[in-house]
Every structure is written in C-alpha cells, then in structure tokens.
C-alpha cells in the first residue's frame, strides 16, 4: 500500500508526459448494431501507469475498454498494441501481453482457487504441452501477491465477494501480461473492499510495473488511484490527464450533468467531488 | 515481463499444492487409470457372461459347447455398448462445456433425434440400406438439429440460455421423433428393420457395424479430448476466454463437430439413447470437479460402463425377453436424474 500511495503522489509535472504508450486508440469508432457508441476516439495509455476511464452510464466507457481488449472490432480506426493493430495480431500472442478482467466473468461450479488461477496460464501453453515449472511459479506468485495462497484449495463459489475478486485478479496476474484491462473491478463490492481492491491494483502496478487500464464508477476513487484520468462523454474523450487537472466542477457538470464542488481530499490530496444535487442547491 | 521468482512460495513451487494444469500427481493419475480399466473390464465381463440364459463362462473358450455361439455373439455387442456409451458420455461433457449449459445433452438438444430422423428419411425415401451410407445421414441430421436448436434458442431476448436451449431442443426432439415414428409406421419394410433400433439397441450387430463407425468415433474422441483446454477457457465466459487468446467461434465450431461425430455415430450404431450424455458428465463432475482434462476421459469411461451395464441389465429383468438398452438407460437414468436434482447438482457449470 505504501508503495502504491507514493506512486500516485509523484508530482503532476512528472506524470504529464507519458514515457511511451504501447496501447493506443487511433480515431477508433466502435459500434453496436450499426450504431456508433464510440466515435473517432484517440487515446494513448501511458506505460507502467494506472489509467482510469470514467463517465456516465451509457457514455461508451466499457465499449472503449472492450474495443481496446479486442473483444469488439472497430468499424473505423484502430487500436494499436506495440504499433500493430490489436485485431490483426494472433489473439493468443496478444494474450501474452494484454490481460483482461471482464465485469462479470463466469465461475465454473466447484472450481478451486488454484484451478481457476491456473487457467490464466492458457496463452502461455501449447495445446498439449505439460504444466511447466514456469507455470507453477507464475501461479504461486499470483496467489502470493493477491493474498489468496491460503485459499488455494477452496472452491471459489464459497468465497466472499472481496476474496473472489482477489482470485480473479490472481488469475489475470498468472497470465503475466505487461498490460491489464479491468472493467469495473469494484462492482458489487462494499466500500471497504473497493478500497482494498484498488490498493491491491496500485501495489501490483508499483511492484510489477504493470500498465493498468480500468473503468470505474466512483469518481473520487478514480481520482485517488489514477495516474491518468480519462473522462468520456457521448463516445468522445472530453478530458484526459492527471486527476488534479481533469476533475473540475465544469467537467463534472459536462460529463455527469451534476453540479458539485471539488475540494482537496484530506487523505490522498487528490480532487474530491462533493455533489450538490437538487435538495441542497441554494446558490442558483 | 515480470521476472518469475521461483520459490517465492515454497509449497507451491515444489508442487505441494497440485495445480489444475496437470493431473494430481502421477500416482493419483495412475490409480485413476487403473480404476477405470478395472471398471471397464468388470462391465465387459458382466455383459459377456450374464444374459437371459445362464451359460458356463468356460463355453466361451470351447467352440464345441452348444452355447458357444451365444457368448461369442455377446462380444461385438459388448464392444458396441462400450463404444456407444463412451461416445455419448464424451459428447455430453463436451456439449455441456461448450454451451456452458448443465442441461445440454445430445438427447435433450434434439441431436440424437435429428440423426434418427435423417437416417429414417434416407432409408425410407432414398432406399439406403447399409450402415456406411446412412451414417452420413446421421451426421447431417445431428448437425442440422444442433444448428437449428441453437438458432431457435438464440431468437429469444436473452440469447441461447440454458432454458431456451432446453425448450427448443425438447420441441425439436419431439417433432423429429414423431416424424420418425410416422415414417416408420407408414413404411412396413423400414419399420421391420428399425423398430428395435428406433428405441435404441446394441444387440444383433456384428463386428462390421462397429468397425464402420469406429473411425468416426475415434476422430470425434480425439477432437473432443484435444479440446479440454478450450473448454476450460470457455467455462470462464466468452469475454474472458477471448482475453485468454481463444477464438471462441472457431473453438465452438470444432467442439460442435466433435459432438456431431460422436453423437451422430452413436445414434447410427445404436439408435437414440437418452440420458447418457446428460447424466454421465454430472455424475463424473462430482468426482473430478470442473477441470475438463480429467472430466472428459472419465466421462467416456463412465458412459461406456453405464451403457454396457444397462444393456446387461436389460437381458435379465424380463427373461426370456430382452429390454432394449434405450429403454434401460431411461429406466436407470430417470431416478439418477432425480437424485442429481435433489442434491442440487443441476446449477450453473
């Protein structure tokens, strides 16, 4: 946690210019049923940092993540991974670089923690290759880093929501990718487990240097944990940069149609959004 | 890429905790294989030596014994029961995995009924009479039924859910079965040949029948067993499977082909056997867990044993008459099915 916190406290100037961007969306248009949800969007994901995508419901933020994860083929433009269109590359090769944790993965009935985490090794294995020492070490490391090693032999469907989410993170870690995309990893968790989950991801980012891209609902947690905050509205990026520069009352009004005050978070010293709402609106 | 730190968790790195990618230690795997072999041998012995007429086992080795031919005829019958049972167990496990649907079964999804209908059409309309020709009709019928059921089930608002697949499959199976019956009733000659086959039987067939079907069964089995890791990935949901580098459409097509080969051939050889493909994977999963590398081979073994024993039982329940194996699998299957429901094993995969 200590390391994670210091990572978010690097002075804004140092974060402003990302060292590089292995994952990039270039003028990408993503559609569902012929209807464009994301239109001609550009986004560069800073390497080895945590990028958080925020926006109102239906703004296209999850669609954008699906497009970057190659689950959705762009109708125009391209998503580039290491300079090559991610949809054109062999998908198994991509899976060794780019990991994905969807919002609602399916837990096979009766699967044990270690069995589930081991499935993260899939892209590293041939159709008939044996389970290697490298596979074993990757799984052990993933279990250890997510604090799930004690749960290894337990069935996943009997764990609490917070533990279960840790197991899914462990599965993604066993995949040993340099980049990890997560679609709302804190959904269905109570606030304590939300903070715990984001701390875990911040630690992993600090320890492994994994580039993290996630969609989050909670703007304040997003501001706290993001190095690079991307606000999406109507399928376009309306603002991107360090949270301190992005989160302003004007932007929140534009993106969420919510009037608010932005104050200093007394704990993390990141922007803290305090909604006004109709009931407390006295100044207008 | 993060450096792998060997020994970061000594217990795991030394294999104290068995991970899913490999069998639970070679010793456990060996004892599993040994147990499977013993079960198959016991079921085979029962099938050869138990029947409506008591025969001394020694008669099998004595060509001059008056009942030698009775026992000798039970050998291809037993092998056929083993092969058909293994095919149906494997097809069921494969189908449940690829649809992520605990109700999936070549019987319930109408695949066996589709194969039957196509075969009867081939015999009755086109006058096809030999197995090597009508096996192709069985494949075509199985494939068309599978695709149709999936298409019908996908029309609903939620897509192909376990419920919509089961309903569409039941409807199509009923339609195909009644059409098959109508054609058999209208055509006395076909009826005579296939009235036993239509309820499912492994009796009265020689080695030639088995040999005709064997290449297709082997191809289906190899394809299905090679797909174990694909099924493990698909089990996590399509998004995650694709995130792990799977092409889910391609994988489903390949596994679907395996199911059509296995279930289509089994139906061509022995008629539409119900419940085997549904029950066997459920029962086996209770032992192996959801890891397909262990589930698939054991489902094949359990299916083989179940059909062989059901056929044996069918020869002794109403002597001197024989009850067809297709009826026996239903008689054995329904109570077992109810037991599974009571134990709550019919949940999501």
Image (cartoon, coloured by chain):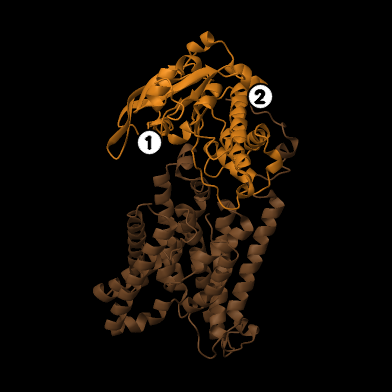
Chain colours: A orange, B brown
Instruction: Say yes or no: labels 1 and 2 on the same chain.
Output: yes
Q: Residue at x 40, y 46 (%)?
A: B250
Residue B212 on image: x %, y %: 42, 67
Looking at marks 1 and 2 on the same chain, the residue that comes earlier in the sequence is marked by: 2
In the orientation shown, which residue stands out farthest toward the left?
B125
Residue at the (41%, 36%) spot, across then down: A71
Picture quarter containing residue A163?
A: top right
Residue A83: name its quadrant: top left
Q: For this view, does B23 lie left or right of residue B134?
A: right
Instruction: Give the chain letter at badge 2.
Output: A
Is residue A134 visible from the viewing direction of this image? Answer: yes
The reply to whether residue A84 is in sight is no
Count neighbours of disc 2 (C-alpha within 10 A) and say few if under 14, some if 14 to 19, many if 20 or more: some
User: Label 1 marks which chain's residue?
Assistant: A
User: Which of the pair B302/B205 is nearer the observer?
Assistant: B302
The circle on residue A72 is 1
Q: Can you identify the residue that label 2 sits on?
A: A1
Q: Cβ–Cβ below 8 Å for labels 1 and 2?
A: no
């Amino acid at each position: 946690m200590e390391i994670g916190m210091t990572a978010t406290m690097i002075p804004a100037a140092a974060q402003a210019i990302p060292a590089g961007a292995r994952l990039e969306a270039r003028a990408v248009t993503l559609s569902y049923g012929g209807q464009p949800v994301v239109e001609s969007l550009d986004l560069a994901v800073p390497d080895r940092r945590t990028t958080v995508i925020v926006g109102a419901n239906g703004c296209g933020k999850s669609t954008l993540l699906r497009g970057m994860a190659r689950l959705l083929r762009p109708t125009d433009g391209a998503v580039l991974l290491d300079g090559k269109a991610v949809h054109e590359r062999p998908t198994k090769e991509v899976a060794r670089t780019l990991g994905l944790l969807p919002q609602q993965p399916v837990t096979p009935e009766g699967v044990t923690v270690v069995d589930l985490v081991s499935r993260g090794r899939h892209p590293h294995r041939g159709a008939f290759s044996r389970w290697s020492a490298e596979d074993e070490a990757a799984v052990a490391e993933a279990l250890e880093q997510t604090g799930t090693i004690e749960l290894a032999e337990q069935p996943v469907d009997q764990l609490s929501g917070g533990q279960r989410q840790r197991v899914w993170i462990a599965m993604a870690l066993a995949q040993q990718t340099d980049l990890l995309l997560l679609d709302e990893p804190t959904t269905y968790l109570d606030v304590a487990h939300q903070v715990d989950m984001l701390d875990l991801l911040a630690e992993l980012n600090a320890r492994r240097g994994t580039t993290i891209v996630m969609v989050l609902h909670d703007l304040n947690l997003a501001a706290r944990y993001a190095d690079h905050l991307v606000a999406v509205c109507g399928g376009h990026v309306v603002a991107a940069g360090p949270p301190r520069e992005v989160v302003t009352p004007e932007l929140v009004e534009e993106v969420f149609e919510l009037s608010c005050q932005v104050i200093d978070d007394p704990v993390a010293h990141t922007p803290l959004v305090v909604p006004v709402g109709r009931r407390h609106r006295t100044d207008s | 890429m993060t450096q792998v730190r060997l020994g970061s968790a000594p217990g795991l790195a030394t294999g104290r905790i068995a991970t899913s990618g490999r069998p639970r230690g070679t010793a456990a795997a060996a004892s599993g294989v040994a147990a499977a072999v013993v079960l198959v041998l016991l079921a085979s012995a029962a099938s050869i030596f138990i029947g409506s007429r008591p025969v001394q086992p020694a008669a099998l080795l004595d060509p001059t014994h008056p009942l030698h031919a009775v026992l000798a005829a039970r050998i291809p019958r037993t092998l056929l029961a083993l092969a058909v049972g293994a095919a149906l167990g494997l097809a069921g496990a494969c189908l449940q995995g690829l649809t992520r649907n605990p109700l999936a079964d070549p019987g319930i999804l109408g695949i066996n009924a589709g194969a039957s209908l196509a075969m009867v059409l081939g015999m009755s309309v086109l006058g096809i009479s030999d197995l090597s020709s009508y096996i192709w009709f069985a494949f075509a019928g199985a494939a068309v039924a599978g695709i149709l059921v999936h298409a019908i089930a996908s029309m609903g608002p939620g897509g192909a859910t376990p419920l919509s697949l089961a309903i569409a499959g039941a409807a199509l199976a009923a339609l195909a079965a009644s059409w098959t019956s109508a054609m058999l009733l209208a055509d006395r000659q076909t009826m005579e040949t296939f009235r036993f086959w239509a309820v499912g039987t492994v009796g009265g067939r020689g080695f030639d029948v088995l040999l005709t079907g064997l290449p297709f069964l082997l191809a289906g089995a190899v394809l299905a067993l090679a797909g174990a890791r694909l099924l493990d990935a698909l089990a996590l949901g399509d998004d995650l499977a694709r995130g792990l580098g799977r092409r889910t459409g391609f994988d489903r097509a390949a596994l679907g082909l395996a199911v059509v080969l296995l279930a289509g051939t089994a139906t061509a050889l022995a008629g539409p056997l119900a419940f085997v493909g549904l029950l066997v994977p459920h029962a086996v999963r209770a032992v192996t867990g959801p890891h397909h590398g262990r589930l698939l081979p054991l489902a094949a073994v359990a299916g083989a044993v179940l059909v062989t024993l059901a056929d044996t039982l069918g020869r002794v329940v109403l002597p001197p008459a024989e009850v067809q194996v297709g009826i026996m699998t239903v008689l054995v299957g329904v109570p077992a099915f109810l037991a599974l429901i009571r134990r709550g094993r019919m949940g999501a995969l």
